[in-house]
Image (spheres, grey):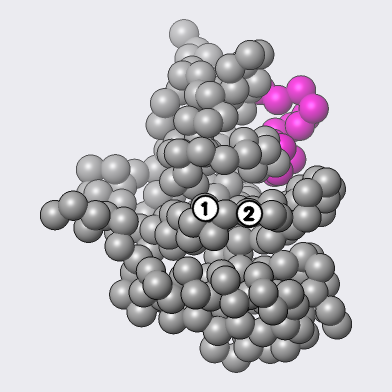
Amino acid sequence: MAGVFDAPVVAARVLIVEDDPTVAEVVARYLQREGYQVEAVADGALGLDRALADPPDLVVLDLMVPSLGGLELCRRLRAVAPVPVIMLTARGEEADRIAGLELGADDYVVKPFSPRELTARVRAVLRRATAPPVPAEELAVLTDAGLELDMVAHEARLDGAPVALTAKEFDLLAHLMRHPRRAFRRQELLEAIWGFSYGDTSTVTVHVRRLREKIEVHPSAPRLVCTVRGVGYRFEPSPVEA
């Protein structure tokens, strides 16, 4: 049974949008070696057309591709299809990485990178995207004051009004609400929500900030998703009225 949980989803399709032929060839070879079906294109507009015409299971996207930049491609793709996206960025492009995460990208890898690391990230993102249904005992509506998370319908409401959370924002909030007042390190949340046992925890920071903007009355002074200095974050439930 060794290695069975590391196997990629059968026939998972990965679209690589990368204009550097050497990088595209190396990434494609490693992913094909892992059993994935791979297509590579060197143009952003063409990559978007391919992704919309026949959505792949995951897109590996270089931010600096010609004709249509990676950020705009990601924005347009995520507006119409919930395709997981892993960005490839150059070292020092922190603003672009944060912008990509805010557009809904699932992860990023900084160049120069190890093809093995990228392959591991692809495997982890696909594993999260194709996770089995929530066990029956966990199907419930999580509530706190005016905040409701319907785990069956995968819907969020605040004071009765729908809240548009991304899949990762929903999972992050649900995880925190299931463990009220427990402080989680960013690395713990990265592993629990994204499936990464290592990586840049700014992914968590960006998602927490976006989440606060959607559910907190005062995002800069959050009451629900609180920062625990030197640790990470915790969900602070409303006090129980006597």
Res. 112 image quadrant: bottom right
**Res. 104 visible in picture:** no
Q: Is residue 113 visible?
A: yes
Label 2 Cα neighbours within 10 Å, binned few <14 / some 14-19 / many ≥20: few
**Location of residue 12 by image quarter:** bottom left
* Residue 121 horizontal/vertical position (percent): 50, 55
Tag 1 residue: 117
Q: Which image quadrant: the N terminus?
A: bottom left
Residue under the image location 47 percent in, 44 percent down: 196
Label 1 with label 2: CB-CB less than 8 Å: yes
Left or right: residue 213 versus residue 4 is right
* Residue 78 x %, y %: 66, 69
Q: Which residues are magenta?
A: 208-224
Q: Secondary structure at mark 2?
A: loop
Magenta-drawn stretch contains 221? yes
Q: CA distance from mark 1 to mark 2?
A: 7 Å
Label 1 secondary element: helix
Query: Could you tell me the amino acid type at mark 1?
Result: Glu
The front one of 200 and 214 is 200
**Towards the viewer: 153 or 174:** 174
Q: Residues within 10 Å of mark 1 (few under 14, many from 20)?
A: few
Q: Position of residue 182 (x, y in %)?
A: 46, 19
Residue 11 placement, left or right of 231: left
Q: Amino acid at mark 2?
A: Phe
- The residue at which mark 2 appears reads as 113
Q: Residue at x 50, y 24 (%)?
A: 184
Residue pictured at 62% horizontal, 36% vertical: 201
Q: Residue furthest top?
A: 242
Specify the farthest residue to the left.
Answer: 1
| Residue at image coords 53%, 31% | 187
On screen, residue 229 versus residue 192, left or right, reads right
